Every structure is written in C-alpha cells, then in structure tokens.
Amino acid sequence: MEFTSWVRIVTYRYGLAPLSSAGSLHGVGGRFNAGTDLDDQTLKAWPCLYIAQDYETAFREKFQLATGDNLGGLTALDLALTPNASHSTVVLRGQLANVFALNDDKALNAVCRVLRRIKMPEAAVRLQKRLKISSRDNYMIRSPFQLKRALLAQNWRLQPVQFGMPAPSQIFAELIRAAGFEGVLYESTKGPGQCLAIFPEALEDGSYVELVDPAPEPIKHTRLDCTNSDALSGWDDVAKQLRPTA
C-alpha cells in the first residue's frame, strides 16, 4: 500500500519526534494497540503510529469533534482532555507491504471462518442464563458485519478504562500483528476519511513512513522504517518497570 499527503497531529511534547509512537503506549492505548494501563495478564503493551487520510479526519480523531464545530459553545480544543493544548501537524507519505484492510470483505471472511470454530465457554453460557442476558447482547462474532461493528465501536474505550480489559479491536490487533501484518487500514468513526494504525516493530524491509516537508534541524528522525523502529517505538517515554524485558 502506498500513501501520500496523509496527516498526523502530534501533541506538542512530541513535536520533535513526530514519527514516535510514544503517546500510544500511555493509558489504555489506542483502538488497535494495548497501552501500559491494561491488565498485563491480558495483553502486553505495544506501540502504534496512528495517521489519517486528511487533516479533517486527523483532527476529529485527535479531538473527537470537527474543526469548526462546537458543543454548547465549546470548541473541540475546549473539550479535549487537555484544553487549549498545543499540537503540531505533519504531512506524511509512505509504503507498507502488508496491511489488513477492514474494507476488504475477503479478509474479514477469512478471519470469521476461524472465529466460527470457537464456541462460547460453557461457564459463559451458564452465567448468561443465570443473569438473563439476551443473546443479542452477548454473542460470539460469526460474520464480517459483527466483526467490523465490534472493531469500529464508538465507545471502544469503555471496557479498557472501566475494567483494564482489552477492547475487541485491541485483541484483534494483537492477532493481526502475530500474523505478520504491519498495520490496519480502517474507516474513521469520527471523520470523513480513512486511518492507518501502523505497528513500527512489524515493519518489513522496504516499508516506511516519512515526512513530506523539510523538517527543523532538531528533528532527528524524518523517516520511520525497520532500521529505526526501535528508536521510534516510544518505550523511552514509559517508566522502566513497564517496559518489556529482553
């Protein structure tokens, strides 16, 4: 997959490392990666670089509201977790050899063929009956429609934030990484364009993401590829006790 003029909005503290995945490791992580706040008995954290097809999509993904919109008189920046926080915008281009596209029905069907072999645990069935939970609210994913709905849920953070348990999209991403994919291409749930979740540690030889425009001199890395993915993984920004052991 080749892409050009894609956009990344970076929190200002990471402005000199716009291709670093450090931010994705904090908290519960992102839609397609696990952060250090998740229960480490479920998923171990891994870094992910999130980029968007255009500025509007990147802005909405970052601030959860369109650039010109307001809610009750408050702008997207007012409603951000860090109101009026500075940020930088970079334009990117690149190439990835192996991307899982959520708009590819054949790919989704292949995953669902595997999922159909997995039965709901008997303990879960008994608990569902005892608590009188409707089968509409508690089911095993069997179809591409169900899978895509779970992966692109608006409130995907609910389970990670409340219980420290990974969201379906994070579990899916772990499987995708293990299968050798370098990232996930998906439709933004907030903006008009697509997004890419890129796994730096999975980049193959020849795959890369780079800044389109000349960078200020203090920026050390203007290109992310397999030769510097460790340096841009962001683990240096995480407390030592939370970093992976060799």
Image (spheres, grey):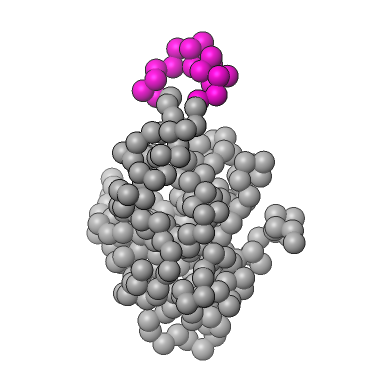
Q: Evaluate whether residue 90 shows in this view.
A: no
Q: Nearer the viewer, residue 175 or 52?
A: 175
Q: Give the camera-side residue of 141 and 25.
A: 141
Asked whether residue 115 is drawn in magenta, I would say no
In percent of width and height, residue 157 lies at 47, 42
Q: Nearest the camera: 190 or 123? A: 123
In which quadrant is the C terminus drawn?
Answer: bottom right
Q: Residue at x 31, y 74 (%)?
A: 5
Of residues 49 and 113, the one drawn nearer to the viewer in this rendering = 113
> Where's residue 29, x and y in %?
53, 52
Residue occupying image coordinates x 50% and y 25%: 120
Res 75 quadrant in image: bottom left
Total numbered circles: 0
In the figure, is residue 179 to the left or right of 189? right
Quadrant (top left/top right/bottom left/bottom right) for the N terminus? bottom left
Q: Which residues are magenta?
A: 120-137
